[in-house]
Amino acid sequence: MSHDTRPVFQQALGPAWDRLGDAIRRHYTMAPHSNDHVCVRGTMHEVHHAPWAALLMPFGRLFGALVPYTGREVPIEVHYRCRPDDPHLYWDRIFRFAGRAPFHFRSHMEHDAADGALVIEYVRFGIGMRLAVSAEDGALVFRDRGYVWRLGGLRIPLPLGLLLGTAYVEERPDPRDPDAFSMRMLLRHRWFGDVFRYNGSFRLPDDLPDDLPNDR
């Protein structure tokens, strides 16, 4: 049985993949059903959550979905990995807050074959966020399209946005440095303002090739 070995985000973006900045494409050019692995390191210049959001942290820890601490200039490394036995992209974000044990935020992304421009990011117990993917001025942009709970073969919509708000995420190439990019995540509620947000800057590892094929 043949597998689609194009990177997950190339599957979602189609021809728009070629419009991503080189630094973005290079750290996502990993083939599904492989042992491909990339690690980028950087600094989160701000990790913030609203004071009342502390009430959500026990649930965040249960589902592995929320960063429970705040801080500035937080060292971080992000591991992206594929696996030979499935087509998904796995993430392990390791935040190193001063005076605390490293905090891991793990998830995986699946391309939604039923809607080509969507991916779903899953955390524990089948809780997922549907994300529309686009390439905008070289940046990889994700826009929240609602939460789901995967139960067997079903995807049950969850009204979590009423509490958490709407997510926006982008990774943008650094115009001053071809081996660097910035990222930001914002979870904003229409009434309560910013619930969570973080932003940072990253560098690609030295062993990544300078030029990767677009049609892998």
Image (tube, grey):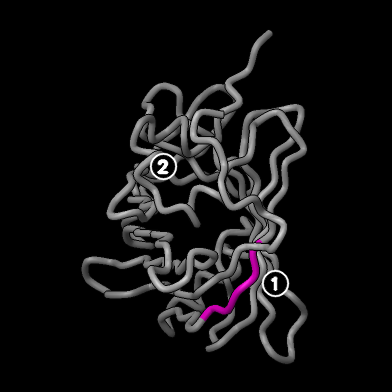
**Is 41 one of the magenta-colored residues?**
yes
Q: In terms of secondary structure, where does tag 2 sit? A: strand
Kindly give the residue lying farthest to the front in the view shown: 210
Q: Gap in Å between the C-alphas at discs 1 and 2?
A: 24 Å
In the image, what residue type sits under mark 2?
Arg
Residue drawn where x is 22% and y is 71% of the image: 191
Q: Which of these two is toward me, 130 or 150?
A: 130
Q: Which residues are magenta?
A: 40-44
Residue 165: quadrant of the picture? bottom left
Residue drawn where x is 63% and y is 17% of the image: 3
Left-right relation of 101 to 187: right
Badge 1: few (under 14), some or many (20 or more) residues near its Cα, within 10 Å? some
Residue 109 position within the rendered picture, expressed as x and y whole percent measured from the top left: 55, 42
Q: Indicate which disc residue 103 carries.
A: 1
Residue 128 position within the rendered picture, expressed as x and y whole percent measured from the top left: 50, 44
User: Which residue is the site of mark 2?
Assistant: 130
Residue 130 position within the rendered picture, expressed as x and y whole percent measured from the top left: 41, 42
Q: Indicate which disc residue 84 carries.
A: none
